[in-house]
Structures are given as structure tokens and as C-alpha cells.
Image (cartoon, helix red, strand yellow):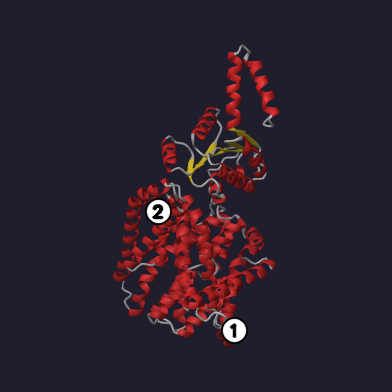
Amino acid sequence: MHGAELLADLCVVLAAAIVAVLALHRLRLPAIAGFLVAGALIGPSGLGLVDRSEDVERQAEIGVVLLLFTIGLEFSLASLRRIARMVLVGGGLQVALTTLATLGLATAAGFTFERALFAGFLVALSSTAIVLRGLSERGEVDAPHGQLTVGILLFQDLCVVPMMLVVPMLAAGDTSAASIGLAVGKALAVMAGTVALARFILPPLLRAVARTQRRDVFLLAVLAVCAGIAWATSLVGLSLSLGAFLAGLVLADSEYGHQALADVLPLRDLFTSLFFVSLGMLLDFEVLREEWLLVTLLALGLIVGKFALAALAGLLMRAPVRVSLLAGAGVAQIGEFSFVLAQLGFDVGLESEHELAEFLNASVITMLLAPLAGSLKPALTHLAARLRPLDRWLAARPLAERVSRARSGHVVILGYGVGGELLAHSLKAAILPYEILDLSVERVKLARSRGEPIEFGDVTRPDLLEHVHVRSAAQVAVLLNDPDATVRAVRAVRALNAEVPITARARFRADVERLREAGATHVVAQEVEGSLQVSSEVLVLAGRTVAEAETIVDESRRSIGCG
């Protein structure tokens, strides 16, 4: 009966999430706030519609693992090198300043050193899921403040590992530099070993799977890589989340990274939605009723303090005032991994159940308010303009926006068979820029060895078409052998770019009208063009001039409706 009960709980969770998201959408609040509200309403301290929250939390853990895996896929080792300064300096300063400030305040409030340091760990982390989703929705990931925000978040995510190793030591009172250094060294060694192992094992495995051109098998392989590396890191005492992040990070540098990300995203979105609902279930209305003032002040203090310290970190690394303020507002909430650390701290005796409830309630409030950070941009920009002399005093250095490799006026080639290869050769001879997308691992490998700008992926997937910059393309050529895939690809391109000219190749005359209805601007039917070429050769051999043959052939083309 447990399976039926779990399914009933999932129905309640999903229905409540949909209703809450739709209701908050009318108030222009993001989906994450809706998930948190839904969890609070249906949870044990709300309406009590779901009293087996452990089952939901167990599935939510999958969401955390997939979340970190996709974060790793989106931020490859190469991209980390590009924003290394933001990660190491910006992130390091934010974590250090927040941890030290919390340590000082907690010690002054009577906490022991160990418990105060643990509180610093909890406060230092921000919500990667909420912030990244907000930046993506506003198109600000590549903006200067977006890069600084992402750098801070990545450093925080990397800090989760040593923090989780240090927490049991704090509970045991073992805070010597040697013990903490050993824990950090262990984490770094495992991370390096995982990256090295994955680099040797992943390429041949995924190459063999990709040759099948079966999306279901490829997805299973990607999930197996994610789960396998996460499980392996857990065996040596590290978190599943770190293993998943490392798996994504390594896979992102391979030619299969874009396809893996596109396949995993729907699963990630489903399970992370459950994760946020489970967080909402942690909201204890009894604690809110009895200590609403304390919880409210604690939540506001966390938001204001984290905003100020993160902005200070940006200023100390000599980022412009505007960038520092916007990044500070972005990370001014408690993160999802703070909940993981808080539960661990409770298990080892670093905090009481009542303290845990107070912290969780205040933290959920900060996460509910976090999506509003984007609406503060005009006010913070105005404040930054008034503080512009501070830029000169600090000798602030502008953070350049990340340069995309997209080129305006390029041609996108979908399919790299004989037709795609010939088109690429012609474009290169004409000195015209182009990008290619193909699902054959052999063709992609061969093309890359020749220096072609090619990506591995399914040409019918809009998220993969984004990686070859269809939105900014001057033309798109669809050269596939599968008629149905050609139609789906044309529709996907047209959905992303309503104006771009699309030239599609059809095998048979019967497919021409279907492709035009799908959005193709020009359709070339192989059956027709091949037959017309034969006609032209026959006419020339019969004594007609080339010009006469071309005129007759053009009339024939128009007469059958292919002109």
C-alpha cells in the first residue's frame, strides 16, 4: 500500500505546486516562490495534506544531485578558468567575510566557538538554484554582475565539501589546524582523482553510446555517469552533490556536454521542483506564531547582512559599485545546502531542535523574498550612480562581459552528411561564417579534427539549437536524410527565430508542402532536382545549348509546382 500512498502524496504535491505557481504568477512572482508556498501549505504544520514528507524529501535529494550535475555541465573547466578571478577572489572574500562576521556575532551572543563557526557556515551559503534561475530568466548570466554572482555561488558550492567534513570535527571539539587541513586535503584529493578518472573513462564510454544514436540509451548513460561518480565520492565520505557536480564539470568539456545537458534538464526541473516543495514543508507555523518577531528579525538580518558583506567583497576586489551592489542583492538569501548542513549539525549535536526550527523558518523566508532581487535593480543602479565617486577612490576595474562565440550573419548547418559537408566547403570558400550541429559521433569527431565549428547534438531540440546560435543566424540549412526529423528541425528553428530564412532539403516531392507548412522558406526536393538535372543532360546531348536546356528545365520545374 506504500506505493499507492506515495503516489497519492505526489499527486497532492504536484497539484498544490501548480495551483501556487499559477496564483503567484499573477503577482509576477517566480515559480520557486510558488513551490515554497505550496510546500508550506500542504506540509505537516500547514493543512497536513502530506504527512509522509520523508518520501518527498528522498526524491528531493535526487533533485539536488541533478541540480549540481547540470550546474557542472553549464560551467565547464574552461568556463571556470574564464571567471577564475570571480570564483577565487569574489567567492573567497564573500565566504570569508560572512563566516567571520557571523562567528563574531554568535560568539558575542554567547555561542561556543564551534557552534559559532558552524553558524557562519550556514549563513555563508546562498541558493544556487534560485539565483541561477533568476539570472537566466532575466538574461543576466553573462552580464558583469551575473559573472560575479556566479563566481561567488560556485565558490560556495565548492566550500560545501570541506564544510561537511569539518562539521563532525566541530561537534567533537577537534578544531586543530592539522585536522581541518587534513579534511580539506582529503576533499581536494578525491576531487582531483575523480576528475582524472572521469577524463579517462568517460570519452570511450559515451562515444560507444553516442554511436547508437539512441537518445534513450544516451540519457541512461549520462544518468549512470552522474549517479556512479556521485556514489563513488560518497563512499569516501564526501557528498553525493559534490560527486554530481564533478561529473557534470568533466562531461561539460567533452563534445557530449550540450546533448547531456539538454537530456537531463527536464528531469532536473521536475526533481528540483520537489526539492523546493520539500523545503516549504519545513516551515513551522507554530514557531512562526510563537516567535514571529524573532524569526522576522532574523530573516531580515540575514538578508541585509549578506547583501552588505557580498557587496563589500565585490568592492574589495575592485569591482564597480553597481556590479557589487547587484551581486550582493543576488546572493542575499540562505542556500539549499545550508539546510543539508543544518540537518547534519542537528544530527551531531551542534544545534537543538528548536534552534534548527528557528533557522529553517527564517531561511525559508529569505528564499521566498530572494526572487524579488531582480526588481531592486533600478533602485540599486540609481544608488550606484550616486556612489560613483567610490569607483574612482577604489580604482575600480570594469568586469568585461563574457564574449560569446556567436557571430552575427553566420549560417547554421543542421546535418553534416555529404550535403552538409559540401555546403560547409562552399561557405568556407566564400569566406562566410557557419556553425554545424550533427548527431553522428563519427562525423563530429572527423569534422573537429579538420577544425570545423561543429557541435554534437540532436538538431530537433531547441535547447541544442541555442548552442549554435540559431537566434542570431543569418540563414539555416537543414540537410537531413530523415523526412520527419527534417520537419521537426524546421519547426524548432522557426520557433526560436521567426525571421531567419530556412532552406530545407526534401527527399521526395511529396515532402515539399509539409516542410513549407512547418516554416521552411525554401525547399529543395532531391527527387525533383535530380530528375531535372538528368533532363538537362539529355537535352544538351540531344543538341540543345546549355542555356536552352536550362530554360526548358526551369519551365518544367514551374509546371510541377517546384519553381
Residue 98 seen in this snapshot: no
Q: Residue 250: which numbered mark, if any?
A: 2
Q: Residue 553: which numbered mark, if any?
A: none
Left or right of residue 282, residue 230 in this image: left
Residue 528 horizontal/vertical position (percent): 61, 30
Residue 229 horizontal/vertical position (percent): 37, 60
Specify which label sits upstream in the sequence, 1 or 2: 2
Nearer the observer: mark 1 or 2; the answer is 2
Front residue of this view, candidates 32 and 389:
32
Residue 278 horizontal/vertical position (percent): 52, 74
Front residue of this view, candidates 444 and 331:
444
Left or right of residue 184, residue 383 in this image: right
Task: Look at the picture and state if 420 lies above or below 277.
Answer: above
Residue density around tag 1, few if under 14, some if 14–19, many if 20 or more, within 10 Å:
some
Task: Look at the picture and state if 244 lies above or below 490.
Answer: below
Residue sitting at x 35%, y 54%: 198
Work out which residue is located at the far bottom of the displayed protein and give it. Answer: 290
Task: Look at the picture and state if 92 lies above or below 82.
Answer: below
